Amino acid sequence: MTQEQSSSSPLIAGRRKAGTVNQSKTAKSPPRKPRTRARPTSPKKTEARLVPQKDAPEDNPLAEKPKTRVKPARPRKSSMSEKNTSKPKLEPADMTALNTEYGRLHEEIKRQESAISDLTNDIEALSSELKKSTARPRLGIFVDVPNLIYGIEDTEIHMGRLLDFLSKDRQLVRAIAYCPISDDPREPIETQKFIAPFINYDYRLVTSPLKRFADGSIKGNCDVEMTVDMLSMAERLDVITLVSGDADFSRAVEAVQSRGVRVEAAAFSGSTSSEIRAISDRYIDLNNVLSEIT
């Protein structure tokens, strides 16, 4: 069928005419309200709408961007100009004042050091004096045996008790008995007159031989040994007890006293010289203490 035949067909023409009429009628009729139906929202669509922020597209202006950690700003380094700034120079007047103050402080320090040194010396001296006052005095006993034995009148002295009496409340350093001995070999030394009384007690025995003279007399003398020992031991003693009244020891007593040592003389009054009584720091008459030494 050709194009001309189709267009001239009555059936097709009628349809077109009817369609044209219907369109015109529809245009003239008032518009109808569209019917709306409430459709239940599916959960899938709701989940799709509630998109988390992290999954929101970047082009969404309402989506919050993740927070970024801001590093603290570092302190700025000092510039070269600050490093090269020079310290203010002191004026001559300020330097003079500083030197004066330094000199004053130096003198004050020296004065304080001198005061501390003097105070230390005083403390040491007081400590030494305190020790001496609390400690017992050091005692040395020197016995002139012939002078002691010949001074006894029908009385026998117990040399151990004599030693205890003289050293009471003191620190005994040394007790020495100076004894002349006989030159007779037949006589045992421990039984001799001047040795036997001291043999069992804490005495150190210093002996010298008896001297025989042409007239038959005998004399024993230990004065030299006794004097030398007293002088040599004086530096280690506080008190010396001289058990003798012989005036020959007067000069030795004075020499010992000059070294700061106290000298006591203990003897029987009948064999004691006035010189020893006068120069000794204390005189002990053994006649008055016989009950303690016999």
Image (cartoon, rainbow, N blue to C red):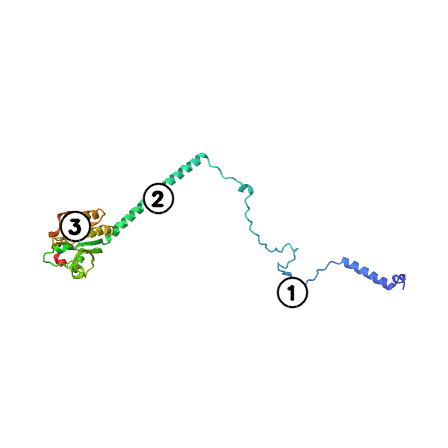
Quadrant of the image containing the N terminus: bottom right
Residue that label 1 marks: 44
Which of the two discs, 1 and 3, sits closer to the camera? 3
Q: Residues within 10 Å of mark 3 (few under 14, many from 20)?
A: some
Which of the two discs, 2 and 1, sits closer to the camera? 2
The residue drawn where x is 27% and y is 50% is 128
SS for dot 1: helix
Foreground residue among 38 and 13: 38
SS for dot 3: strand
Q: What amino acid is labelled 1 in the image? A: Lys
SS for dot 2: helix
Residues at circles 3 and 2 in contact by the CB criterion of under 8 Å = no
Q: Position of residue 136 (x, y in %)?
A: 23, 54
Instruction: Kindly give the residue lying farthest to the left in the view shown.
Output: 154
Residue that label 3 marks: 282
Does residue 42 appear anywhere in the picture? no
Q: CA distance from mark 3 to mark 2?
A: 45 Å
Which of the two discs, 3 and 2, sits closer to the camera? 3
The residue drawn where x is 16% and y is 51% is 265
Q: What amino acid is labelled 3 in the image? A: Arg
Residue that label 2 marks: 113
Q: CA distance from mark 1 to mark 3?
A: 132 Å
Q: Residues within 10 Å of mark 2 (few under 14, many from 20)?
A: few
Left or right: residue 293 compared with residue 232: left
